[in-house]
């Protein structure tokens, strides 16, 4: 049965309320996702250094993914939302200090904060769906979350572009205000959730917990069974890392007198929204991951074409198709992980951690490669390099992926 909240005499699904603070946090994150690479590159004057800073964010996220199952138990989504907002506030503050001091250490610190709070946000959203929603709603819920994420990815660069033309303090005020309003909404509708979860975590302190080594070994047992799915998730994030790292700067390069610099990222996200809106209506029953692999291959082919064209309108068209195919693959992979996590029972967070480890590794390697190849070849040819890598991975996936995934293993 679906969990609901009482609003006067009306009962509304919990997910409808939960999505409100999540939306505001994602909007603040989308603004910073646009501004942070631009501020970093302009302050450090190097795509390569900017890529290293972005990659460091995911390195911190990777380490966080390994310890999350050890620190948090199942049904900790409220506590993790609180941790998300508390940590996220330091992201715009440390970025501002980095700009003022022109010191790379502050950008690395900001990137570390970004890596931590985004992992909190992801785990919170996934844990909420699996803990609070019946399995038959997984596809619709994931479609809703993905659509909200893509919608904020459209609005964020527009707001970010406007903030670039204002004083530096404005972006700090806007982002922190959104984060505090999000937490206010959470406190109003879920006033006791975090307290209950903290008490439960305290009561579990006497329960023997796995060491970090045992945790990694435990995850490895699942990893061996889910390796093709992990590679597929890695590949999706590897492509995304290119756009999140240099998309804003690439957009400035291909901007025309009619289309502004943020329009490239908007195009990517808008067609991603279309994909996530169509996702819940796809007949995804068995072997859905093969459809995701096909979408991945098409995404790689489109990236490869970036280096072959020079007309801005053609680049926008390729970006639109890329956003659609990539987000379609993302959607299917997320659904598959959620179904598997339900089968894993008390080990749900281990499945989420494996998914996040794949994403974090992609966002460690991707930004570094994007920054280096952009300095060496330019943004368009850098995209082609990513496309060639993805096509090679797609061929491998078709050869090694089973028709279905099983968790029957001694772990």
Image (cartoon, grey):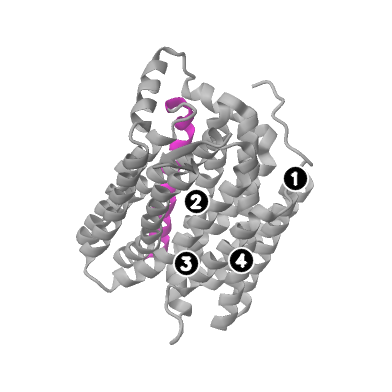
Q: Which residue is mark 4?
A: 322
Tell me which numbered mark, 1 or 3, is placed earlier along the sequence: 3
Tell me which numbered mark, 2 or 3, is placed earlier along the sequence: 3
Front position among marks 2 and 1? 1
The spot of residue 179 in percent (x, y) is 31, 50
Mark 1 vs mark 3, CA separation in Å:
34 Å
SS majority, magenta: helix
Q: Is residue 68 magenta?
A: yes
Front position among marks 3 and 4? 4
Instruction: Provide the secondary structure element on which disc 3 rests.
Output: helix
Q: Which residues are magenta?
A: 46-71
Q: Is residue 188 left or right of residue 20?
A: left
Mark 3 vs mark 4, CA separation in Å:
13 Å
Q: Which residue is mark 2?
A: 363
Q: Which residue is mark 1?
A: 285
The spot of residue 372 in percent (x, y) is 47, 62
Q: Which residue is mark 3?
A: 247
At x 57% / y 62%, what residue is drawn?
272
């Amino acid at each position: 049965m679906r969990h609901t909240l009482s609003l006067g005499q009306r009962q509304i699904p919990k997910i409808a309320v939960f999505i409100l603070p999540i939306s505001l946090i994602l909007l603040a994150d989308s603004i910073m996702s646009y501004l942070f690479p631009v501020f970093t590159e302009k302050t450090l004057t190097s795509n390569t250094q900017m890529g290293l800073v972005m990659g460091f964010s995911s390195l911190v996220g990777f380490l966080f993914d390994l310890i999350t199952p050890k620190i948090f138990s199942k049904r900790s989504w409220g506590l993790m939302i609180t941790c998300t907002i508390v940590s996220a506030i330091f992201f715009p503050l440390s970025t501002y200090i980095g700009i003022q001091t022109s010191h790379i250490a502050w950008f690395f610190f900001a990137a570390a904060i970004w890596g931590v709070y985004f992992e909190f946000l992801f785990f919170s959203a996934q844990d909420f769906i699996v803990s609070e929603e019946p399995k038959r709603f997984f596809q619709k819920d994931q479609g809703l979350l993905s659509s909200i994420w893509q919608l904020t990815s459209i609005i964020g660069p527009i707001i970010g572009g406007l903030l670039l033309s204002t004083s530096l303090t404005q972006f700090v005020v806007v982002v922190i205000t959104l984060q505090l309003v999000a937490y206010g909404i959470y406190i109003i509708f879920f006033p006791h959730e975090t307290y209950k979860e903290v008490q439960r975590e305290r009561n579990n302190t006497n329960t023997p917990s796995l060491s970090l080594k045992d945790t990694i070994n435990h995850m490895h047992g699942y990893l061996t069974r889910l390796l093709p799915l992990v590679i597929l998730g890695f590949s999706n994030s590897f492509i995304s890392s290119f756009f999140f790292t240099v998309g804003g700067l690439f957009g400035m390069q291909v901007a025309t007198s009619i289309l502004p610099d943020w329009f490239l990222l908007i195009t990517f996200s808008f067609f991603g929204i279309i994909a996530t809106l169509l996702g819940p209506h796809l007949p995804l029953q068995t072997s859905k991951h093969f459809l995701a692999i096909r979408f991945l291959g098409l995404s790689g082919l489109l990236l490869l074409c970036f280096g072959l064209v020079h007309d801005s309108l053609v680049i926008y068209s390729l970006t639109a198709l890329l956003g659609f195919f990539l987000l379609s693959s993302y959607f299917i992979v997320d659904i598959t992980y959620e179904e598997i996590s339900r089968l894993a029972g008390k080990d749900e967070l281990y499945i989420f951690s494996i998914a996040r480890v794949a994403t974090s590794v992609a966002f460690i390697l991707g930004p570094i490669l994007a920054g280096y190849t952009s300095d060496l070849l330019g943004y368009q040819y850098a995209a082609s390099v990513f496309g060639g890598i993805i096509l090679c991975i797609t061929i491998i996936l078709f050869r090694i992926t089973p028709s279905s995934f099983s968790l029957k293993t001694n772990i």
